[in-house]
Structures are given as C-alpha cells and as structure tokens.
Amino acid sequence: MQARDMSQRRRGAAAALLALVVLLGSTSPPNAAAQPSSWSPLVARVNKDASTSLYTIAIKDGGVPLLLLDLAGPMIWIANCPCRHRAIECGSNDCLGISNMFAPDICAGAEWPVQVQGRCICTAMPYNPVDGRCVAAQATTISVAANATDGRNPLFPVSFPVVGSCAPGELLASLPAGVAGVAGLARLPNSLPLQVANWFRLKQEFALCLPRGGDGVAIFGGGPFQLLAAPTVEELADNLRKNPLPFLFNPKNRAYYFTITGIAVNQQRVPTPSGAFGMDWRGQGGAAFSTVTPYTALRWDIYWPLRNAFDAATSGIARADKVAPFDMCYQASELTMTRVGYAVASIDLMLDGGQNWTLPGASSLVQVNDQTVCFAFVQTAASSAPAHAESPAVILGGHQLEDNLLLFDLDKDTFAFSGLLLGIGTTCSNFDFSMGSS
Ligand SMILES: *[C@@H]1O[C@H](CO)[C@@H](O)[C@H](O)[C@H]1NC(C)=O
Ligand SMILES: *[C@@H]1O[C@H](CO)[C@@H](O)[C@H](O)[C@H]1NC(C)=O
C-alpha cells in the first residue's frame, strides 16, 4: 500500500510537469496563465452503439479514439499496441499499481505472455466484459485525450498517459465495431476516473449521462454539470451531491454495488422473498450498475414477482407476441405517450434511506418494432453476464440508466442519481459540445 502511495505522489509531481508541457504545447488555451495550479475536470463524448446496445467513450489519443465504456471494468486496455509501445517493467511503481488482485476468477487460467528476452515485462489481465474472455498481456502506457471543461462546454484539449494494458486483436470480438479497447471505470487505482484524478490532482469523482441516441457525456474530476434545455435546467450536480447514497463493497471485485430494499409497482410493494436483495459473504447477490448489460437483469425470484405485478397493473393494455429476449410485450398502438414515456404503472426501486429510483414508461418499456413495445427487463442467466461472475440479484443495466445523470464519488464511496431527465425537459444528449471559452 505504501509503495502505491509513493508512486501516486511521484506521479503527481510528474503530472504537474507534464500538464505544464501539455498546456504550453497546445494551441493557446484560454486563461492559461490563471490556471496552472488548479486543473479543470475533463469531458468526453459517450455514444450508444446501435447494433450491440453497448456504450463507447471517445478518449483514446491518436488513431481510433473509441473505447468500450465499462463501468465495472478494473483498467484500460487497447488491442494491437504499436510495436514500439512503452512496456512497463516488473517491479516498477507502475507495475505495482496493476491490480490483478481483482481480475475476474476466469483470468486465473489466462496464458502467460512471451517475455521479451532479458527483460521482465509487467503482466496485466485485460478482460472482455461482454464475452468474458481474459488474456495475460504486457502492461503499457496509453495516451488518453479529452477536453478540459467548466461543466458547460469543452474548453481546450489535453492529453496525458495512463497505465493500462496491450491485448491481442482477438480480444475485441463481440465489442462494438470500431472500438480500440476497453475503458474500465471501477473503484481501482488503474481505472480511468482514478488515473485522471491522480494525474491532474482533481476530485475522485465522475459524472455519467448515457444517451439513447446522439452524444451522451462523461465528466471526470468533479465540478458542475449543465445540460441545454428550455426552460433552462440549472446546474444539476450540486443538488444531487446533497443526497448521496453509499456503495456496498463486494469482497470479490470493485464494481459499483448498492442497496435495494424492495420494489414497488404503482406504489404497491412487490412480494419478493425476504432477504432477496441482500449480498452474502462470498459477494453473491446485491444490486450493481452495469453499462455492458443492455436491459436490467433480475434473479428469477425477483423477476417473476415484478413481472407478474406489472402484468396485473397493465392488464387493460392489449398484448403482442413476445419478442426475444423479452417475456411480455404490448401493442404499441394501445399505449399513450407522456413526457416520461408510455403511460403505464411506474416501478419504484426502493433504496437506502427511503429514496426511490422511479422508472416511468420510458425506462420500464422499450419499443422493439413498429407494432411492439416490451417490458424491458430480463432474467439473469447463470452464464449471461460474464462481467458479473458474482451474480448480483439486480443488475441495473443500460436502458434503465439512460437519460439519468449519475454521479460517482470514489473518495466518499457514494453515488447520486437524477431520475429520468425527461421529467425536467432534457436528456443526456443535451450537453453543449461546442467549444466554450470561460
Ligand atoms: C474537444 O472538443 C471538440 C468540440 O466538441 C471536439 O471536436 C474535439 O474532438 C475534442 N477533443 C478531444 C481530444 O476530445
Ligand atoms: C417510495 O416508494 C414506496 C413504494 O412505492 C412508497 O411507499 C414511498 O412513499 C416512496 N417514498 C418516497 C420518499 O417517495
């Protein structure tokens, strides 16, 4: 632990120097003189890949900028490193930070890479969260690029190195076409948010707003968060920070787990077995966020009571043939639209301290074709979610997270959420990506 602290402090000092170099080297950033000691948070675009329903983040410097966004991923990796990449030596401070300790169990069988003659190269375990494959590969430094931001616009570009891993090109299979690797955002020192925070001496926080279409947004390093809307939506982040909820620790990984105490449909509590939402000592159960699970997945003993309650609460709406992977579908023509999606019974995820995460029609249903709208939840299958080998009881997935502002505080180990932004007349695609000048 001490070695890691040292390496972070040293990296901090180097960071200040490099930051200055980047600043001087870039095309005259506004306010450069006023800013040398306090860095702005960074902003990056987040997009949804239509064919896989997975999310990408534009963050890599040079060549293909897109990486798969994996909220639960431990680190950053890119496939097909350039031949002359800077491999990290065994025993170096950067190597100590490569946290294979939380690599998924499946990585234990990964094949060891060929070592370069006469040198010991630090080994990392890049992992594909969609198909669950893992390999052993060389740790390296990867150049990352983003814009500084005031929470309202991008201001000026910055780039900086992070510690990550190379991977063979085959590890990209099953990821969206056009991505170069994976950006992991978990609570581990080598994840993207913590490396940004350490390098630029920013808050260990990030904001994530997943889009249904268009450009969504991620902001690393804290600060305000503003979306375009009419009427104007005031700065959102500060208010949300007043109602934080604690993360739950899983002994097996550092993904984002939280506590659900119950589920309600139309304010009626759904009868789930007692203890259904709890996590056991092995890390099985509990609720977790996932950006690589397109639709919220529930263990069967929670899925069926919820599905049956929703079935009863929507019994007046004509059904349509089921469309996989969904189990209950409606005729689109029978549903009316409101500001927050289809007019149906709302679902409350009841959280710690009496807060509810309410899922209105836009979050609970999904249109699958011209005639059909389906109940947008699935059952967890033992093998369906390799990203969560620990099998949470509830995996809160992409469709239900979209158009919500999520704030993650890795220093306080808390999160906050806005609820569906459509309710206040905006969406995650309303960040103003035109260059600003504050
Ligand atoms: C910075 O923002 C501008 C304007 O949105 C964009 O064109 C550019 O690609 C961004 N640069 C980086 C490195 O993200
Ligand atoms: C949360 O949801 C439950 C069930 O619908 C309801 O009884 C309770 O009043 C809600 N709490 C708040 C603070 O809205």
Image (tube, rainbow, N blue to C red):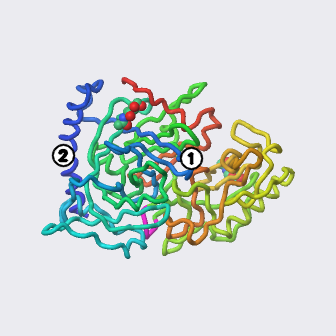
Residue that carries the numbered disc 1 in the rendered image: 50
Q: Is residue 423 above or below residue 351?
A: above
Q: Is residue 284 left or right of residue 205?
A: right
Label 1 vs 2, first from the N-terminus: 2
Q: Residues within 10 Å of mark 2 (few under 14, many from 20)?
A: few
Res 339 label: none
Q: Is residue 187 visible?
A: yes
Toward the viewer: 113 or 414?
Answer: 113
Q: Quadrant of residue 182?
A: bottom left
Residue that sits furthest to the right in the current view: 316
Does residue 253 show up magenta in the picture?
Answer: yes
Q: In this view, does 67 lie above or below 110?
A: above
Q: Which amino acid does label 1 sit on?
A: Ala
> Magenta segment, which residues?
250-254
Q: State the residue at coordinates (40%, 25%).
A: 436
Q: What residue type is labelled 2?
A: Ala
Dot 1 falls on a residue whose secondary structure is loop
Q: How far across and down, in percent of the image, does residue 416 sit?
A: 52, 47
Main secondary structure along the magenta-highlighted residues: strand
Q: State the residue at coordinates (40%, 67%).
A: 134
Does residue 405 show up magenta in the picture?
Answer: no
Q: Is residue 438 above or below residue 127?
A: above
Res 14 label: 2
Q: State the residue at coordinates (54%, 46%).
A: 417
Toward the viewer: 29 or 345?
Answer: 29
Residue that sits furthest to the left in the current view: 118
Q: Are marks 1 and 2 in contact (CB under 8 Å)?
A: no
Q: Is residue 404 left or right of residue 8?
A: right
Q: How far across and down, in percent of the image, does residue 30 sit?
A: 30, 24
Q: Can residue 242 be seen in this view?
A: no
Q: How far across and down, in percent of the image, does residue 96 sit?
A: 24, 63
Toward the viewer: 374 or 321?
Answer: 321
